[in-house]
Image: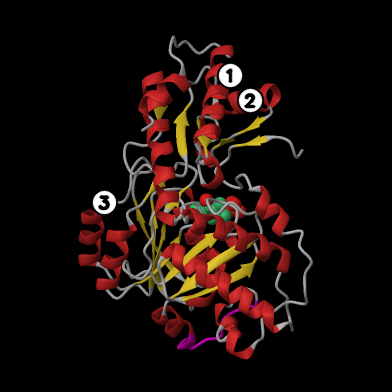
């Protein structure tokens, strides 16, 4: 199980120094004051990655916890919530809103490109009575990337709080939380950050905190209540025992990013993603998207006579290589490669493209071109 080549859009590969950090001796994270400093320091470092001075918390639970917790903490019965949907995760946000009594209004657009700011503006001119809006930064099943630098400030103009799922983009795509006025940003350990799965990252603005605290009704539940974290550092008290080994690993993964430099990390993603897209097209495959390409994941249409499931099974059986198909309606047709985090590296992408090239040809795909050669041609 542990010797596979993993090239999925998260969980992604974890560097050895992160794995080793998780094996360090631990203290009691409930009462050791040094751990509060350590935890706070990790949060501050994440703030440097996503460019914010807002409060950041690391929650014990995989990325979905952040999506549910923001909806649980913000939504009161009858609140109108705008769910911006141009992908499977985008639409799915509506389920969490409904679960906590909110009234969902979808802004649904085609899934093959990013949200157009003008269309959103026209929509808001007619109806902007929303407590908050949800949007996905990179919607992973199709890889579409939305331009938060335009969308979030626009929503703020209309006094709408923003909840952004950046789970599949954080540390692989630029995000400037403060400049772009994003109220709640969600991330997770196992995507571009390249630590093992198990942790959610949440950043919360003052406006979002105010909205959570000025509710008329109580927040349902405890685990999903984000207000229980407030002033944890001053109080030296966490709401529950922190998974210290996971956090030691996350801290090291964040150090890896900051040691390389976030700008350099983003540039590495861009170079790899660009050349991947160009080479796949010239090789004779179609990309799923027409615009809004993310640099963390590429969705490729696999010819029907082969099919994405058959190809991915073939790759695991013959090359010990794990890639992902897609979700829902795209499961049979789309293959996804996750060139994110530790996998956004030249030696790794070349290996995976070679495996795709060989597998496709062995399954009858007709191309006289070589995917790796094409990649090298476009990589600059
Ligand atoms: C991975 C991911 C999550 C977390 O969901 P899981 O399916 O549990 O991994 C949330 N949002 C996005 C956009 C993701 O890519």
Of label 2 and label 3, which has the lower sequence position?
A: 3
Q: Quadrant of residue 342?
A: top right
Dot 1: within a 10 Å radius of its alpha carbon, few (fewer than 14), some, or many (20 or more) residues?
Answer: some
Instruction: Please state, as top left, top right, bottom left or bottom right, where the N terminus lies in the image.
Output: top right
The answer for how far apart the CA atoms under marks 1 and 2 are is 7 Å
Q: Can residue 214 be found in the magenta stretch?
A: yes
User: Do labels 1 and 2 touch, CB within 8 Å?
Assistant: yes
Residue at image mark 1: 359
* Res. 116 mark: 3
Percent position of residue 178, x then y? 35, 71
Percent position of residue 247, x then y? 66, 65
**Number of numbered discs visible in the structure rendering:** 3
* Res. 306 mark: none
User: Do labels 2 and 3 touch, CB within 8 Å?
Assistant: no
Is label 2 in a helix, a strand or a loop?
helix
Q: Is residue 365 above or below residue 77?
A: above
Q: Say left or right for 298 vs 230.
A: left
* Res. 315 mark: 2
Q: Say left or right for 3 vs 149.
A: right
For this rendering, which residue is in front, 46 or 69? 46
Q: Is residue 240 above or below residue 270?
A: below
Q: Which residues are magenta?
A: 213-222
User: Do labels 1 and 3 touch, CB within 8 Å?
Assistant: no
Of label 1 and label 3, which has the lower sequence position?
A: 3
Is label 3 in a helix, a strand or a loop?
loop
The answer for how far apart the CA atoms under marks 1 and 3 are is 37 Å
């Amino acid at each position: 199980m542990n010797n596979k080549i993993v090239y999925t859009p998260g969980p992604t590969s974890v560097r050895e120094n992160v794995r080793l950090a998780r094996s360090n001796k631990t203290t009691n994270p409930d009462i050791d004051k040094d751990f509060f400093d350590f935890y706070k320091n990790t949060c501050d470092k994440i703030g440097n990655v996503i460019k914010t001075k807002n409060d950041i918390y690391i929650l014990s639970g995989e990325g979905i916890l952040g999506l549910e917790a923001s909806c649980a903490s913000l939504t009161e019965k009858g609140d109108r919530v705008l769910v911006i949907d141009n992908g499977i995760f985008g639409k799915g946000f509506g389920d969490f809103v409904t679960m906590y009594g909110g009234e969902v209004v979808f802004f649904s657009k085609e899934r093959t490109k990013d949200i157009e700011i003008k269309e959103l503006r026209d929509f808001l001119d007619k109806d902007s009575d929303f407590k908050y809006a949800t949007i996905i930064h990179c919607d992973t099943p199709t890889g579409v990337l939305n331009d938060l630098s335009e969308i979030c400030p626009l929503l703020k103009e209309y006094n709408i709080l923003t909840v952004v799922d950046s789970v599949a983009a954080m540390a692989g795509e630029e995000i400037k939380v403060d400049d772009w006025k994003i109220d709640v940003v969600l991330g997770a350990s196992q995507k571009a950050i390249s630590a093992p799965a198990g942790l959610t990252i949440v950043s919360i603005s003052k406006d979002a905190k105010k909205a959570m605290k000025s509710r008329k009704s109580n927040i349902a539940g405890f685990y999903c209540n984000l207000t229980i974290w407030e002033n944890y550092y001053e109080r030296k008290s966490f709401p529950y025992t922190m998974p210290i080994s996971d956090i030691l690993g996350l801290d090291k993964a964040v150090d890896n990013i900051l040691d390389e430099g976030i700008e350099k990390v983003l540039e590495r993603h861009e170079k790899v993603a660009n050349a991947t897209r160009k080479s796949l097209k010239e090789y004779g495959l179609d990309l799923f998207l027409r615009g809004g390409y993310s640099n963390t994941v590429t969705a490729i249409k696999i010819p029907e006579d082969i099919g994405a499931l058959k190809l991915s099974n073939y790759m695991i059986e013959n090359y010990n290589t794990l890639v992902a198909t897609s979700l829902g309606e795209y499961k049979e047709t789309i293959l996804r490669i996750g060139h994110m985090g530790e996998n956004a590296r030249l030696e790794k992408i070349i290996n995976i493209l070679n495996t795709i090239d060989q597998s496709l040809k062995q399954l009858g795909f007709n191309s006289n071109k070589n995917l790796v050669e094409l990649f090298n041609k476009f990589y600059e």
